[in-house]
Image (cartoon, rainbow, N blue to C red):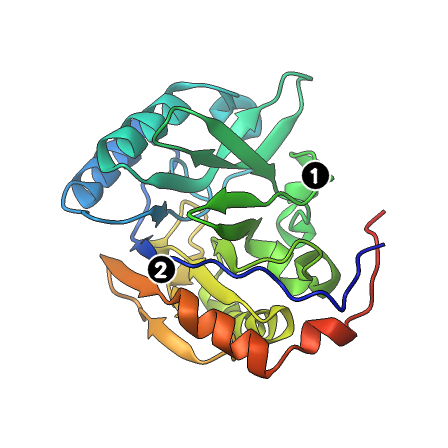
C-alpha cells in the first residue's frame, strides 16, 4: 500500500501546452491530417500538444474499415510532428491491436521517436461503442519535464474512481468528442476532477457536426488544482497555448494536502 502521509514530489519546471480545438472531416483521415498540418504549423515553444478524440475520423463505430495498425500512417505522422516541434503530440485514433481487437487509443508521440498509448477504458454504450471496441484495462501515466501526466478519453470523465489519482498525477488530460446536448455535464465534471485530484486538468473537445449529425460545442478548457478556469475556448476554431505553473501547484499542495487523508485503493 502507498504511504499517503508522504508529500508528493512536485515538478520544478513549468509546462507549456497547446490545445487544438477544431472541426473534423467525417471518415477522412488524410483530409484531417492535412488540416492539422496547417494548425500545427505555427505552434512554437511548447512541451505538449493535445488533439481531440478520434481526430482523424470523427467519433465513428466503423472500426473495421477505419482502424489503422498500431504503428500506422497516423502514428508515423504524429511522431514526425513531435520531432519537428520538439514536443509530445497526443490524441486518440482508431487502432487495430496486435490481438486483432479494435481500440479507441490515445497515442503519446514523443520527439525522441518513442510511442506510448492509453486505451479508452469506458466505452460509450449509448453510442454502441462497446459493441465495436475493446476497453482498456490499465491507467497510464507519462513523465514529461518532471510532470506526471495521465491521459483519459471522453466518457472516462464520468467515472471518478478511474479518474482518481493513485499515481501522484500533476496533469489530467481528457481528449474528447463530447456532444453539445450534454455540455453542462462536461463543464461541471471537469472542475470536480481537478479539485479531487489536486492537479491541473486540460480537456480538448471538437466542434462542428459529425456524419451522424451530432453537434459538438467545443468548450475545451484548462483548469487549475482548485477547479478554477484558466481557459475556456467556447466554440472557437483555434489553437490555444498556455503555461502551467509548477510553483503554484507545489504551493497549493503544501497549503492544502488533502491527498494525505485519501482512501487507498487498488483498481481491479
The vertical placement of 84 against 207, above or below, is above
Mark yes or no: residue 184 visible. Answer: no
Q: Is residue 74 visible?
A: yes
Q: Position of residue 264 (x, y in %)?
A: 83, 62
| The image quarter in which residue 72 lies | top left
Q: Residues within 10 Å of mark 2 (few under 14, many from 20)?
A: some
- Residue 14's disc is 2
Sequence order check, earlier mark of 1 and 2: 2
Which residue has dot 1 on it? 135
Q: Residue at x 20, y 45 (%)?
A: 39
Residue at 37%, 20% (x, y): give it: 73
| Location of residue 41 (image quadrant) | top left
- Closer to the eye: label 1 or 2: 2
Residue found at x 66% / y 47%: 123
Local SS, label 2: loop
Q: Alpha-carbon distance for marks 1 and 2? A: 33 Å
Q: Position of residue 130 (x, y in %)?
A: 70, 41
Which residue is painted at 37% across and 39% down in the image? Answer: 88
Helix or strand or loop: what does disc 1 sit on?
A: loop
Tell me, yes or no, whether the two marked residues, 1 and 2, touch with CB atoms within 8 Å. no
Which quarter of the rendered picture does the N terminus lie within?
A: bottom right
Q: Is residue 53 left or right of residue 239?
A: right
Amino acid at each position: 500500500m502507498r504511504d499517503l502521509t508522504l508529500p508528493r514530489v512536485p515538478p520544478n519546471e513549468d509546462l507549456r501546452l497547446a490545445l487544438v480545438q477544431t472541426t473534423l472531416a467525417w471518415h477522412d483521415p488524410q483530409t484531417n491530417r492535412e488540416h492539422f498540418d496547417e494548425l500545427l504549423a505555427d505552434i512554437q515553444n511548447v512541451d505538449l500538444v493535445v488533439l481531440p478524440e478520434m481526430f482523424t475520423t470523427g467519433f465513428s463505430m466503423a472500426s473495421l474499415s477505419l482502424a489503422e495498425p498500431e504503428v500506422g500512417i497516423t502514428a508515423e505522422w504524429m511522431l514526425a510532428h513531435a520531432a519537428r516541434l520538439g514536443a509530445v503530440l497526443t490524441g486518440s485514433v482508431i487502432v487495430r491491436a496486435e490481438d486483432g481487437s479494435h481500440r479507441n487509443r490515445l497515442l503519446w508521440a514523443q520527439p525522441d521517436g518513442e510511442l506510448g498509448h492509453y486505451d479508452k477504458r469506458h466505452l460509450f454504450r449509448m453510442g454502441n461503442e462497446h459493441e465495436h471496441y475493446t476497453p482498456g484495462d490499465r491507467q497510464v501515466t507519462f513523465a514529461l519535464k518532471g510532470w506526471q501526466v495521465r491521459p483519459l478519453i471522453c466518457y472516462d470523465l464520468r467515472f471518478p474512481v478511474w479518474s482518481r489519482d493513485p499515481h501522484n498525477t500533476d496533469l489530467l488530460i481528457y481528449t474528447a468528442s463530447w456532444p453539445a446536448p450534454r455540455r453542462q455535464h462536461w463543464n461541471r465534471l471537469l472542475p470536480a476532477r481537478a479539485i479531487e485530484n489536486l492537479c491541473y486538468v486540460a480537456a480538448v473537445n471538437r466542434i462542428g457536426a459529425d456524419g451522424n449529425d451530432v453537434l459538438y460545442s467545443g468548450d475545451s478548457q484548462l483548469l487549475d488544482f482548485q477547479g478554477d478556469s484558466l481557459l475556456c475556448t467556447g466554440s472557437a476554431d483555434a489553437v490555444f497555448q498556455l503555461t502551467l505553473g509548477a510553483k503554484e501547484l507545489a504551493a497549493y499542495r503544501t497549503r492544502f494536502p488533502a491527498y494525505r487523508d485519501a482512501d487507498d485503493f487498488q483498481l481491479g
